[in-house]
Image (tube, rainbow, N blue to C red):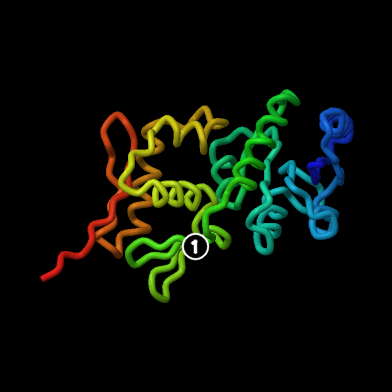
Amino acid sequence: MIKVLYIEDEESLAMIVKDSLESYGFHVHHVVNGGQALANHQRYQPDVVLLDIMLPLVDGFSIATEIRKTDQLTPIIFLTAMTQTDDVVKGFKLGGTDYIRKPFKIEELIVRIEACLRKTTTNSSPSTLTIGLYTLDTIKTTLRHGEHVEKLSYREMELLKRLIENRDRVVPREEIIRTYWSNDAFFTGRSLDVFISRMRKHLAADPRIKIVNVRGIGYTLSFEEAQET
């Protein structure tokens, strides 16, 4: 049975969501404020966290930050009425796995939960990936170059991981947007270009690594081996 930690202070909504999820076979542990969230996360060890942002005592962004200090794997899905793009971006940078705007249908929530869990449970790749001078740690979401360690957002880590695993193969643009930005109506192909440019800067210390834009199709990560002399 899938264990859900649900942090929501609007009790009427929480009751509906909790009852609905349990009718589909989930086990839901509901808490009403941020002060209870971290202790319950440690005690309950959920498979997924559903997290409102506007909470009493401690807001959802702060809760996500604290969870990610000790738990990089459990999916965190933000459920919120906050719709500003900056809030969405902040949620993902703090380690959010998905972001659903209120009001939402329970069927959509279930599909999102299942998709997040599928990514977690089917991930059989190693926790570290190396390319050139860089080592990507998918647990700590860090990119190491020598002594320099850079903290990546969860989304940056996931996309870089996918590009490395598909080295020299094109990852389609539409697939990237659908996988990582399916819930963001404001994210466009141009937004993806900007995001990729930022990722290139993360890898700039090793000129052999290139993220190439295959025009109109997608992106491919290539690594030019050093020429023997």
x then y, percent, for residue 136: 46, 61
Q: Residue at x 36, y 34 (%)?
A: 190
Q: Nearer the viewer, residue 138 or 188?
A: 138
Q: In the rendered image, which quarter is residue 148 located in?
A: bottom left
x then y, percent, for residue 61: 67, 50
The residue lying furthest to the left in this view is 229
Q: In the rendered image, which quarter is residue 84 located in?
A: top right
Describe residue 68's horizontal placement relative to residue 162 as left or right. right
x then y, percent, for residue 208: 25, 59
Q: Residue at x 73, y 23 (%)?
A: 105
- Classed neighbour count for the residue bearing mark 1: other residues with Cα under 10 Å, few (<14), some (14–19), many (≥20): some
Q: Which residue is mark 1?
A: 128
Examine the rendered structure and indicate whether residue 8 appears above or below residue 210: above
Looking at the rendered image, the quarter that the N terminus falls into is top right
The residue lying furthest to the bottom in this view is 147
x then y, percent, for residue 110: 72, 31
Looking at the rendered image, the quarter that the C terminus falls into is bottom left
Label 1 secondary element = strand
Query: Which kind of residue does numbered mark 1 sit on?
Result: Thr
